[in-house]
Structures are given as C-alpha cells and as structure tokens.
Amino acid sequence: MTSTDDARTVDARAVTEAAVSTAADLEPLFQTLSAGLAALGAGLSEDQFPARGLDLLRASGFWGAGGETVLPGPAMLRLMRLVGRASLPLGRLFEGHVNALALISAYGSAEQRAGAAQDIREGRLFGVWNTEGQDGVQLLGGSAPDTTPLTLQGAKTFASGGFQVTRPLLPVDRRGERQLVLLRADAPESELRAVPGSWQPLGMGATGSVTLDFTGSRVGESDLIGQPGDYYRQPMFSAGALRFCAVQQGGAERLLDEVRGYLHRLGRGHDEVQMLRFAGCWTALRGAALMLAEGERLERACLAGRVSEARLLAQVDAVRLATEDACLALLEASERAVGARGLLEPEPFSRLVRDLRMYLRQPAPDAARLRLGQWVLNDWTPDDWTPDDWNPEDD
C-alpha cells in the first residue's frame, strides 16, 4: 500500500508510461468490441439490465481496464464513448466498474491488486457506490482494545447495478474519516437488503440501481483500500469525470445519428430548418469532444508535473459544463425534430432521451460552474492556452 504523496506520483507516472507502450495493440480489440456491440443491436435497446452487453465486455479484453489492463488515456475515453454509444446504462455500469479498479490500482496493496485481478478473471462486476442519505454508512469496531469485528451500518442510494455488482467499493465513515471498503457482496458475511421502490427513475432504469442497506455486513482489515481520505484525493477524484463525460458524449452521438436516420426516412434530411437546428448541435458536441481530449492531455501533463493541479481541475469542470450544455441542446433539438410521433414506441427516442437526461444529472453541476468561473476570473491568463504546455511526444 502506497503511503506517501511522492510515492503516489511516481506510481502514476509509471502507469502512464506503461500505458503508452500498449497503444499499438488495442485496435483489433476496439474493432471486435465495436462489431459485437453493433451485433447486439436491440438487445441493448430494451429497458432491461444489460447482461449481454456486460458479457461482451467480459470477453473483449477490456474487462480489466483501469486495473491490470492499463490503457492510454485516449484509448480509455474512446472505450467509454464506444460503450456509451451502444447503451448509456451499459456505459454507466462499465464506467463504475473501471472507476473501482482504478481506485484499487492506485491505493490498494499488492495483495489487494492481485485479488482484484483474480476477481476480474472470474468475471466479477465492480462498482463504486458513494451516494448516501443523511446518516450515511458507518464502519464500526476493529480498534484496540475493542475486539469486535468490523461491521457496516447504514445504506447507500443510487447503488448502480444492485445485486449484480459483487465487488462494490464503498466510501464509508470510520471515526470521522472517509475510508474505502471493498465489499464481497456475494460472501456469507455480507448482508445486503434492497429498499423496495427505491429505483423508479425517469431514465437509466436498466442500470438496476437501488438503495441498499448494508447493516450487519462484516468486513476484514484486508478489505480496507488505501488510507482514510484517499477517495477524495486530487486530481484523481475529479478527473474521473472525464470518463463519464465520454460515456455521455457517446450516448449523445447515438441520439444524433438516430435522429438523422429518422429524418431521412421521412424525407426531411434536406429540410433547411433541421439543417440550421443540427448544425449548432453538431458544433457543440464536437467542441465538447475537443474539450474532453484536451482534458485527457492535461491530466497526463499534470501527472508528469508540467501542468498544475488547479489547471487540470478547471479543465475537468469545463468538460463537464461543455458536455452537459451540448447534450441538453441536442435533447431539445431532437424532441422538436422528431415530434410526438417520434417519441412513441417502437422508435428509440423516448428511451434515449430519458436515459441521457437522467445520466446528465451528475453531482454538483452548479458548484462546477462556480469553480470554473472563479478560476477564469482570478487565475486564468491567455498564456494558459499554448501548445507549449504539453510535450509533443505525448500527443
């Protein structure tokens, strides 16, 4: 287990260097995954838990992404965009899986990383469940002279994947500090109880999210990942938003492509009103995609010590805002373009619209906008946007 900030920086650089060397081997995997997701077709379009999509990812070579399968940053975002384009619920579940593996890789011990690698080989689904009610989840016992076992008390809301996630990573409260706990949800010592009726969402119903009560579940010291406070350690905590933005952008691209096909089937592909409407949408989506790519480059530059953490985090906030604004504009344009008839089954638009609107509701968007405005007015200078910030060999 890494114990110092300097050691974590060295580890991050080593991971980055190792990732770059694997880039040439990924194209066949991407091509196979893309073809497989396309072949699933309607199997990922129904409002059901995307088990078939997860099975495809298990067999893709990307199931360990974020952990033992180290991907270059651009490849990771490409992967997230590709999965999000196929299915936003699938993308949400897979992004949480990758997030958990990345946290274990960054903060876990060698034994914990090896255990996660074995779980990956066995096909287990990981996730990160952070959202909770006012009381939260407490980790009780385990401190001398107390000999009682470590137990959990409390519940998590928005537990994406529910009982399908057998390796959830839980940030919990332990004596006033936030500690990551890897719960073996399928073990006899784990007691999970779903709160009935806790998942009746506008969209993203296929994720199977639910409120889960963990009270009475026992864990061991070997299940504690990292040190207290590691979960919120920057820049990793905030920079993870780049992955879910990539999933959202993939879903938006799918929506735009479906609208385009629908308009052509109606003979309206050359309608000037529609052209004007979607010119702006495409421009906003491409702008968000470029902001995302810049965020990934800045993350690498920050890990290498060439860019400040503050600059990277400002860029992450900018990516979140650009993605949300572009997606909301596309949703409005799409609803207007397809009309009431297009929002009826079996057309896919009502589901795509609901899923994207729901997935866009990420935590604290107004706080992100305020942070970015604070940085722009007080820290940004025109020199912040120059190509000299990055080593050309990294791009």
Image (cartoon, grey):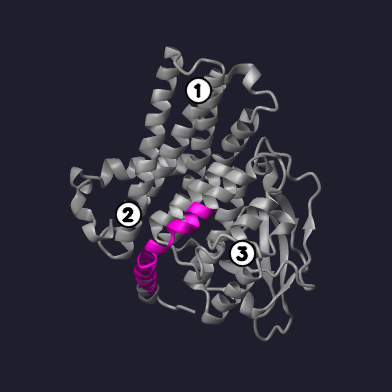
Q: Secondary structure at mark 1?
A: helix
Q: CA distance from mark 2 to mark 1?
A: 31 Å
Please provide percent x and percent y for residue 161.
Answer: 68, 53
Residue found farthest to the bottom: 145
Q: Where's the C terminus, which quadrant?
A: bottom left
| Residue 20 inside the magenta-drawn segment | yes
Q: Quick one: label 3, few (<14), some, or many (20+) residues within 10 Å?
A: many
Residue 362 shows up from this direction: no
Image check: 275 left or right of 207? Answer: left
Mark 3: amino acid:
Leu
Please give the residue where the numbered disc 2 appears in the rendered image. Answer: 297
Label whose residue precedes the other's in the sequence (2 or 3) = 3
Q: Quick one: label 2, few (<14), some, or many (20+) residues within 10 Å?
A: some
Please give the residue where the numbered disc 3 appears in the rendered image. Answer: 169
Which residue is depicted at the point 50% across and 64% down?
66
| Residue 170 inside the magenta-drawn segment | no
Please provide percent x and percent y for residue 279.
Answer: 39, 24
Mark 1: amino acid:
Ala
Choose between 273 and 157: the one closer to the eye. Answer: 273
Report the magenta residues as a range: 11-32
Choose between 35 and 71: the one closer to the eye. Answer: 35
Name the mark nearer the viewer: 2 or 3. Answer: 2
Residue 84 shows up from this direction: yes
Numbered mark located on residue 356 in the image: none
Q: Secondary structure at mark 2?
A: helix
Please provide percent x and percent y for residue 114.
Answer: 56, 78
- Quarter of the image for residue 190 reads bottom right
